[in-house]
């Protein structure tokens, strides 16, 4: 079981690195990479950026759950 959580932790770590690098910095971002996109009035972010935010938060929650699960498994000695 520890191996499953370790592999999932590695995969989500790599995914989080990729997703954070895709986020908009001071300059462009994902929306500029694909030709601008349609901006919305809510916060000035495009649909692609909002979806990227949601995916990043989801991957972060999975990553955090893996950390907690591995900690509990290693503490119990399994």
Image (spheres, rainbow, N blue to C red):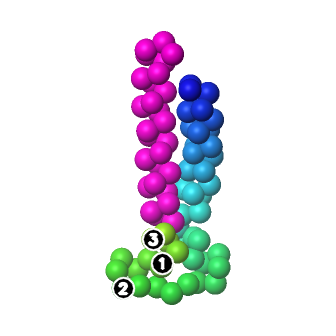
Instruction: Report which residue position mark 2 lands on.
Output: 41
Would you say the residues marked 3 and 1 are in contact, meaning their CB atoms lie under 8 Å apart?
A: yes
Instruction: Report which residue position mark 1 lands on.
Output: 47
Q: Residue at 47% x, 21% y: name it.
A: 73
What x and y, as percent, mark residue 16? 56, 50
Instruction: Report which residue position mark 3 lands on.
Output: 50
What x and y, as percent, mark residue 65? 43, 38
Would you say the residues marked 2 and 1 are in contact, meaning their CB atoms lie under 8 Å apart?
A: no
Q: Which residues are magenta?
A: 52-78
In three-dimensional space, the C-alpha distance between marks 3 and 1, rounded to whole angstroms, equals: 5 Å
- Single out the mark in the foreground, 2 or 1: 1
In three-dimensional space, the C-alpha distance between marks 2 and 3, rounded to whole angstroms, equals: 12 Å
- Single out the mark in the foreground, 2 or 3: 3
In three-dimensional space, the C-alpha distance between marks 2 and 1, rounded to whole angstroms, equals: 11 Å
What x and y, as percent, mark residue 6? 59, 31
Q: Magenta stretch: residue 67 in it?
A: yes
Instruction: Name the dominant secondary structure of the magenta segment.
Output: helix
Q: Work out which residue is located at the far top of the displayed protein and give it.
A: 77
Q: Residue at 45% x, 63% y: name it.
A: 54
Q: Residue at 48% x, 79% y: name it.
A: 46
């Amino acid at each position: 079981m520890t191996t499953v959580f370790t592999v999932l932790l590695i995969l989500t770590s790599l995914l989080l690195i990729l997703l954070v690098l895709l986020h908009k910095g001071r300059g462009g971002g994902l929306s500029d990479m694909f030709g601008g996109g349609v901006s919305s009035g809510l916060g000035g972010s495009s649909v692609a950026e909002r979806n990227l935010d949601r995916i990043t938060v989801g991957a972060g929650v999975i990553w955090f759950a893996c950390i907690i699960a591995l900690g509990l498994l290693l503490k119990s000695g399994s």
